[in-house]
Image (cartoon, rainbow, N blue to C red):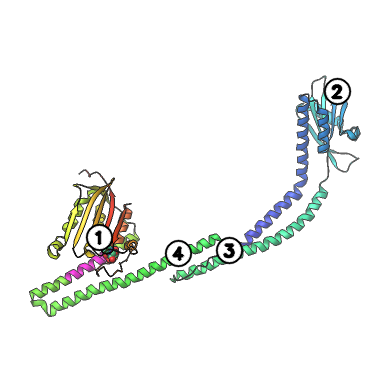
Amino acid sequence: MWTYFAGLGIGVLMLLWVLQIFFLNNGYERMKIQEVDRVGGLLKSAYKSQDKNLNSSIQELSVINDFYVMMEVKGQILLFAPEQESTLPIYKYKDQLPQLKEAIFKGDPDSPTFFKFSTMYEKYSTLAYALFLDDTKDKEVILYIFSPLYPVTSTVNILKDQLINVTIITLLVTFILAGYLASSISKPIRGITSTAKQMGTGDYNVNFRVDSFTEINNLANTLNMTAYELGMADTRQKDLIANVSHDLKTPLTMIRSYAEMIRDLSGNDPEKREVHLGVIIDESVRMANLVSDMATISAMRTAKMELNKSSFDLSAITASILASYEILEAQEGYQFKFTCPKECFVYADEDRIKQVIANLTGNAIKYGGEDKLVSVNIRRSGKKYRLEVSDNGPGISAEELPHVWDRYYKVSSNYVRPASGTGLGLSIVKEILTLHHARYGVSSKLGKGSTFWFELEMAKPQKA
Ligand code: ADP
């Protein structure tokens, strides 16, 4: 970084040297030629328009630009400028006048003639210029301009002296400033790199130090946030492993002890054996649910879930899911209330939407109220169908409500009776509905119950 900064400083200085010292001479001559040409053009147009002030314009321009100007009409020099010097230029440049004249008669009458010459009177050279103001045979009006080319060597020398000072000071300032900038930028970056390395080893409890530079500041803040998120994910992951091993261990212990009981005690008692087998079956169902939830989540994490969309009747699949709860109705007194339009076709992934409805109704059963009532309602909402699953359970507090969609989240409230959840169901629901770009949500009041809902675009029935 220091090298780049210093290099830039040196480059700028070199450019300054080249422009000032080497090109000053050339530039000066080019500028003079342009100036003479410009004045010549001005005077020609003033002559052409028969400007009454031509004489005074010539005087003025010659003084301003330090030129000698002469006008010759049919071989007679009629006008000199500047006036004070009277006829001096004629004597000064008498050797060049015939040359200029010859050149101008030979060349194009509309374009000027230039050349550079030196005389024995002066140390410096002079730029000579001639232009026809009128080239008709009987008039032949010629304009001559002589511009001394004062030597720039002395100026160049002064500049050189000054440039040496400027170079020394600039280089010193550049090196110091470059050093300061380089260290103040690279030091915090080195700090961030070493903290990132520490984070790479799995230590998420790190702090990226913020700095005075906005960009580095932003980087440090972003990395701090990343470290925090990674730390959270890591904690959740560890919690999950702990939960999962605990959750798997409990049903496994139950299955093992009831199996042993059947072998040792109830094997020959049909009644007790049925009860014990029932426990074994329930526990294995619980385990199977847990394992399948975890498998879904991990599949969603590793590969992007592909949707297999088709047009289907939302009310039909809801009815079939509710029908599978018949046993709960018959044996445990649950009530399912289902209202829907006659047909409600949507275009979505049928299996995934079944999974969503099963998760929402399953939760309404698990976390429902004493009345054991679960209501499912489908209705039109604009160009969409809205499905709502409501229960009269203990509900979820406003603080916890936004988190129920998070992975592995279980409401901590005591109102909710312990249930065999995995904390994964709603995050699967969220993932599926997000993939469908569907709106979804929940409203809940403590002690009153909860309503989970989602909306899907209406579709035409698919032709068979
Ligand atoms: P779980 O497998 O634990 O049910 P979910 O992701 O489906 O996981 O739900 C997350 C948490 O949200 C649940 O543990 C529960 O505390 C709460 N929850 C979900 N649905 C309801 C509901 N209908 N009423 C009250 N709480 C609910």
Q: Amino acid at mark 2?
A: Lys
The structure residue drawn at horizontal position 51% and vertical position 69%, both measured from the top left corner, is 194
Residue at mark 3 = 185
Residue at mark 4 = 225
Question: Who comes first in sequence, dot 3 or dot 1?
Answer: 3
Q: Secondary structure at mark 3?
A: helix
Is 45 placed left or right of 122 in the picture? Answer: left
Q: Whereabouts is ligand 1, in terms of quadrant?
A: bottom left
Q: Residue furthest top?
A: 138
- Please state the extent of the stretch shown in magenta in the rendering: 280-293
Residue at mark 1 = 359
Instruction: Tell me how far mark 1 sits from mark 4, CA to CA.
Output: 32 Å
Is label 3 or label 1 in front?
1
Question: Who comes first in sequence, dot 2 or dot 1?
Answer: 2
- Is ligand 1 closer than 8 angstroms to the Cβ of mark 1? yes
Instruction: Tell me how far mark 2 sits from mark 1, CA to CA.
Output: 112 Å
Residue 403: where, in percent of width, then height? 34, 63
- Asked whether 460 or 214 is in front, the reply is 214
Instruction: Tell me how far mark 2 sits from mark 4, CA to CA.
Output: 91 Å
Q: Amino acid at mark 3?
A: Ile
Quadrant into which the N terminus falls: bottom right
Residues at marks 3 and 2 touching, judged by CB atoms closer than 8 Å = no
Q: Secondary structure at mark 2?
A: loop
Is label 4 or label 3 in front?
4
Residue at mark 2 = 74
Question: Who comes first in sequence, dot 4 or dot 3?
Answer: 3
Q: Secondary structure at mark 1?
A: helix
